[in-house]
Each structure stands twice: as C-alpha cells, then as structure tokens.
Image (cartoon, grey):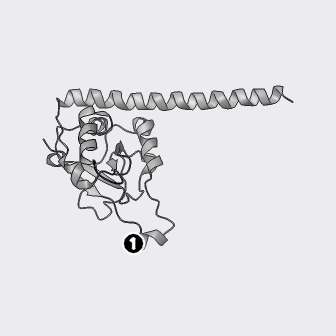
Amino acid sequence: MKLEDIVTVRIGRNLSRGNEKNDPTLVAYSYEDLINDLDGSFLESQTSFYSGNSNHKDSYLSIPGDVVFSFVSSKAGIVSHSNQGKIINQNFAKLIIEHNHLDSSYLCYVLNESYSMKRQMAISMQGSTVPKLTPAILKELEITLPSIEKQQTIGKAYFSLRKRQALVKKQAELEEKLYLEVLKQLDQ
C-alpha cells in the first residue's frame, strides 16, 4: 500500500515569510533536533503520547510523539519532550498516522533503514540536480505492514540500537577528551 493510504503528510510552515522570522520566542525544529530524537531522547520519554489534533491551530508546532520527516536528509524521527513546541518548518513534515495498525517507531525504521524504501527514494530522485525528497514522492512510497506486534518489536529494537550507538559515540568522545587531558598534564 502507498504511504498516503495510512499516513497524512502535513508540510511544515514556511518561516521565511510572515511574522515568525521576527519572533525570537519561536524556535524551529532542526536537523540536530531530529538526530537527537533519533539517538534516544524518545526512549527516555513516556511510551504513550498524545498525537495531536489535526485541526489544532498550532498543528505546525512539535508535540512529543509526533513523527517528523526531513525532506533534506530523508530521515524520520519521533519528537521528544525536549523538543516540544518547536516550529516544524518547510524542510520537515509531520507524518500523522491514520491507520491503527501502524507503529510510529516502525515507521521511522522503515523510512530510515529499509532497503526497499531507500531504493524507492533513490529511483524517485534520479535526475534531480539537488536530490531532495518531495511530499508528492513521499506519499507515493510503497510500504508493507507486518503485524502490529512485529512492528512494535522492530521499532523498539531500532530505537534501542540508535540510543546504544549514540552512547558508544559519546563514550569515545569522553575517552578521547580524558586521554588528551592526561597527555597534556604529562607534557608539562
């Protein structure tokens, strides 16, 4: 089935127009926020989220549990509590799950890691000067759904792996910093 059959793609707000660009209290959701959310912030949050009312006037604001997709990096993530209330700009879309048999963590896994999905994306972007997924291409991607139990298992394992990778990276950075500090002390 096509992604648009089970997910509504709501494109973020264009921040280069209007009053938003002059309002210092509004913070845009960024690529760094997406990566931080992918690297485990979501696991530290509650497991059940309010997914938001699609008719809500601030539907371009991030709500914990929202699935967001970056058109620039072709990555999906789940908004954590630390990124609540940030504006989703036009480089992102909220993926509002309309099908009760689709797990949000699994959706992120499929969009980020599935060979089939990556192949579809690559074929769709062929010939582009700047390879960037468009909302129209995203909606047309074909997805197959295993049982909800299997989706939840895969999704949870995927986010656990992402968190583990982030912790290993952080540990390596701290070890490097420690060793360099020790070497600096020995050199004096």
Which of the image's four quarters has the N terminus? Answer: top left
Taking 104 as reference, is 45 left or right? right
At label 1, counting other C-alpha atoms closer than 10 Å, the crowd grade (few under 14, some 14-19, many 20 or more) is: few
Where residue 98 appears, as percent x and y from the top left, is 18, 47
Does residue 72 lie above or below 100 as drawn?
Answer: below
Where residue 14 appears, as percent x and y from the top left, is 36, 65
Q: Residue at x 17, y 49 (%)?
A: 4
Q: Residue at x 17, y 37 (%)?
A: 101
In this orientation, which residue lies closer to the viewer: 103 or 119? Answer: 119
Extreme bottom residue here?
18
Taking 9 as reference, is 157 left or right? right
Residue type (three-letter) at the residue carrying disc 1: Arg
In this orientation, which residue lies closer to the viewer: 140 or 185? Answer: 140
What SS does tag 1 mark? loop
Residue under label 1: 17
Where residue 106 appears, as percent x and y from the top left, is 27, 35
